[in-house]
Amino acid sequence: MKRFLTTSILAAMVAVGTALMAQDYPDEYLGLPGDNLNLYAVMNLFQKSETIEGFEKSLNDENTRINNLDLNNDNYIDYIKVIDYVDGNVHTMVMQAVLDRNESQDVGVFTVQKLSDGSVQIQLIGDEALYGRNYIVEPIYAETPNPGYTGRSGRQNVNVVTTTYVEVATWPLVRYIYLPDYRIWRSSWYWGYYPSYWNPWRPYYYHYYYGYHYNWYPQYYSHFHRYDRPRYDRWNDFYYSDKRVYSRNVTININEGHYKNTYSRPEQRREGEALYAKVHPERASSMSTGNSNSRRQASEGVSNRQSTGSDNGTTRRSTGTVGGNTRANTKSSAGQSTVTNRRSSSETVSSRPASSSKSGQKAEPARTTKQQSTGKSSSARRTTEKAKKETVVRQSSSTKKESESSSTRRK
């Protein structure tokens, strides 16, 4: 019975440990330094770049969040320079980390091969010290698949976007290196002598780095996949046996486990996902993860972003509204005051006629009185004139009587 209980407990512990390990160490986990330089992201950056110089600059830009390598363990990111070795129509472009004054380490190699019909094949091969043997990333070519190798999709339900060798030939950087006046690129930077834009930063823990890139994988896996061997037939002779640069110290550090500390913060995956949501809010709605806590944390990051965005939007909107409203209010108030002034003016104008009418109303009786007085005086004049006439008539009649009486006396 005790053995049964012990066996059950051990089985449960193994199951829990396996689940935690599956959660903490995803499918993309290698357990090698290459975990901190995502070659899918590097290939995606190469496809978008226009020149090798521009590609090198973007690769070493903290804001692209692609380079997270610290191979010399100085707690700062290593600068990665690019060197192009040309073999006929094949460009072997090496990405090389500068570790010390006399020490470097190749981290990955692009092989770009132009075929006789003008089409181009491209692969990105990770250095075996950092990724293991034959860790190769390439576009998903529209060709008959290799029956012995199906590739590694890494995600289910991914919409695959195939490409052709002809389409690869149209990539800006591919066109650039096949121009007639192209000058072979050999990065001139070395230990202690870097470009002015280089400002090394402290490396992130692996799970933080992976958490950020996790939500890019659907896009990565839609366009790129793993392949099992180099397509360039002179890979071993031209590059691996002759030009490959590797550091013994890096090999020693790997064997002694000096890079394991990067895996010591599995809880930071949530912070990495939250950073992704913050930096790429337009893509955050399509985020999905198997870890509910990660999803919750990422959504909180999105919420913070959106609330900030809403606040900013509200602020902008408020500012715009205030400004707009201020302008509108100013205009409306000005209009209103103008209208009011106009109304006041019109009221003043109206009041003037009103005053005039009142004055007119007051003046009317005056005019009537005058007219009445004028009528009275005229009637008085008429009476006086009549009286005068009557007086004259009386006087004349009395004069006649007197003259008749005097004439009678004479007789």
Image (tube, rainbow, N blue to C red):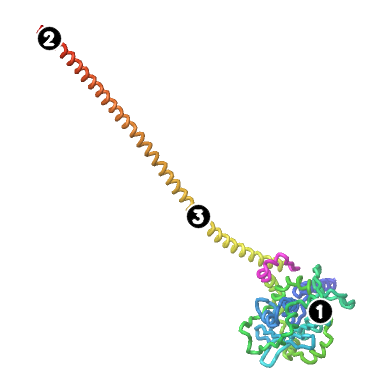
Q: Say if the magenta span includes residue 287.
A: yes
Towards the viewer: 236 or 249 = 236
Label drawn at residue 407: 2
Q: Residue beneath label 3, please?
A: 331
Which badge, 3 or 1, comes first in the chain's sequence? Answer: 1
Q: CA distance from mark 3 to mark 1?
A: 65 Å
Residue 192 covered by magenta stretch: no
Q: Which residues are magenta?
A: 274-291
Between 74 and 115, the one lying in front of the other is 115
Category of crowding for the residue at label 1, using alpha-carbon neighbours closer than 10 angstroms: few (below 14), some (14–19), many (at least 20): some
Instruction: Judge whether 342 appears above or below 162 on screen.
Output: above
Q: Relative to residue 37, is residue 295 depicted above or below?
A: above
Q: Amino acid at mark 1?
A: Ser
Q: Amino acid at mark 3?
A: Lys
**Contact check, label 3 and label 1, Cβ < 8 Å:** no
Q: Mark 3 or 2 closer to N-term?
A: 3
Element type at mark 2? helix
Residue drawn 52% across the image and 55% down it: 328
Instruction: Identify which residue is drawn at 80% across, 82% down.
Output: 114
Question: Residue 283's spot in the image, x, y percent?
Answer: 70, 67
Which amino acid lies under the numbered mark 2 shown in the image of this protein? Ser
Residue at left offset 40%, top offset 40%: 353
The percent coordinates of residue 81 (x first, y second) are 69, 85
Q: CA distance from mark 3 to mark 2?
A: 109 Å
Q: CA distance from mark 1 to mark 2?
A: 168 Å
Is disc 3 placed on a helix, strand or loop?
helix
Q: Earlier in the sequence, mark 1 or mark 2?
A: 1
**Viewer-side residue, 2 vs 109:** 109
160 horizontally vs 63: left or right: right
